Image (tube, rainbow, N blue to C red):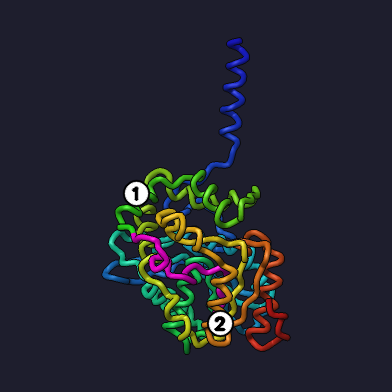
Amino acid sequence: MSIRLLALALAFTTALAAAPQARADPYLADFPYPYPVSRYDFRSQGEDVWMSYMDVAPKTPNGRTIVLLHGKNFCGATWESVIKPLSAAGYRVIVPDQIGFCRSAKPHGYQMSLHQLAANTHALLQSLGIKKPIIMGHSMGGMLAMRYALMYPDDMTALVLANPIGLEDWKAKGVPLATVDELYAGELKTSADTIRGYQRKVYYHGNWRPAYDRWVDMLAGMYQGEGRETVAWAQARASDMILSQPVIYEIDQIKVPTLLLIGERDITAVGRNRASPEDAAKLGNYPVLAREAAKRIPGASLVTFEDLGHSPQVEAPEQFNATLLKSLDVLLGQGPAPAKP
């Protein structure tokens, strides 16, 4: 019996050693990004900070640049499946990690605001000599992209929103605000299991594929080991930013050509767990929210994915990319308009 138990213990230990582990680093130093990462150093709010970014040049340029903005639970690397086809189509692709996220600086006392992050992104693009880019944002990056469009309408060509959050004001719909300290306490509980459980339920409508585990490991690694408090504090302030700085009331003022790409099985609603069951059930109705937003943004186009959720570019990359490229041609006046959803 003892020999059998010893053999089982040895097998279990071997399996654990062989299993891929989340990388424990608050700046993702050991996580492989799909393209070389550069660093933009600048001074902001009295501190020396930096933004890490990928700058992917096409082999045959079409003269356009597209900037991909990540969400709160994402990094620039998560755009991996989108960068390659955009580059192949001739776009120069810029993919930054925002201050407070992923490979970029996480200063402890930095005031997190969508306005500040948009200004940082604009400064990065100016440093690279980029004019009139297409700004594309996903999830929180969609909120940021909308703020960017409101701030710099004359310095961009178009706006693309892939399942943006912030198409509703959660507080006005019953979500109580939380202090940064309360949000920080919640962030400290983050693990691979909590990330996976949340994403399976909210992002992928109950489904899970092994390919998604890579992105879970990416996020979970930042919360492990030394530096986890730095990550949790930055993420808590990002949550406060998202909850307390709605953009939805200003979308009527967006002046640039706009495209919404929406997975209709998305149910993302920040702070839903703090709302009453009655209010929570009404949040994150993307089929309705997307159509309401498209009507309010002057001249906006809406393309929907009936069977996809919050991250259509991760869930069905080939379908998403084909739709994105075709829709960009339409948005830029180079192709026929698709049928309305």
Residue 318 versus residue 181 in the image, above or below: below
Which residue occupies the extreme front position in the image? 278
- Please state the horizontal and vertical placement of residue 147, each as a whole percent of the image: 43, 77
Asked if residue 105 can be seen in this view, the reply is: no
Q: Is residue 96 magenta?
A: no
Using the image, tell me which numbered label, if any, was put on residue 309: none
Asked if residue 166 can be seen in this view, the reply is: yes
Residue type at mark 1: give it: Ala
Which residue occupies the extreme left position in the image? 46
Q: Is residue 167 magenta?
A: yes
Range of magenta residues: 159-177
- Please state the horizontal and vertical placement of residue 252, each as a whole percent of the image: 47, 84
Residue 340 or residue 94, whichever sits in front: 340
Q: Kindly report the distance in space between the C-alpha atoms of the residues bearing marks 2 and 1.
A: 39 Å
Q: Earlier in the sequence, mark 2 or mark 1?
A: 1
Q: Is residue 234 left or right of residue 142?
A: left
Residue indicated by mark 2? 295
Q: Is residue 258 left or right of residue 319?
A: left
Few, some or many residues within 10 Å of mark 2 (<14, 14–19, 20+): few
Few, some or many residues within 10 Å of mark 1 (<14, 14–19, 20+): some
Residue 237 versus residue 56 in the image, above or below: above
Residue 121 or residue 204, whichever sits in front: 204
Residue indicated by mark 1? 185
x 36%, y 62%: residue: 240
**Figure quadrant of residue 16:** top right
- Please state the horizontal and vertical placement of residue 320, each as a whole percent of the image: 67, 68
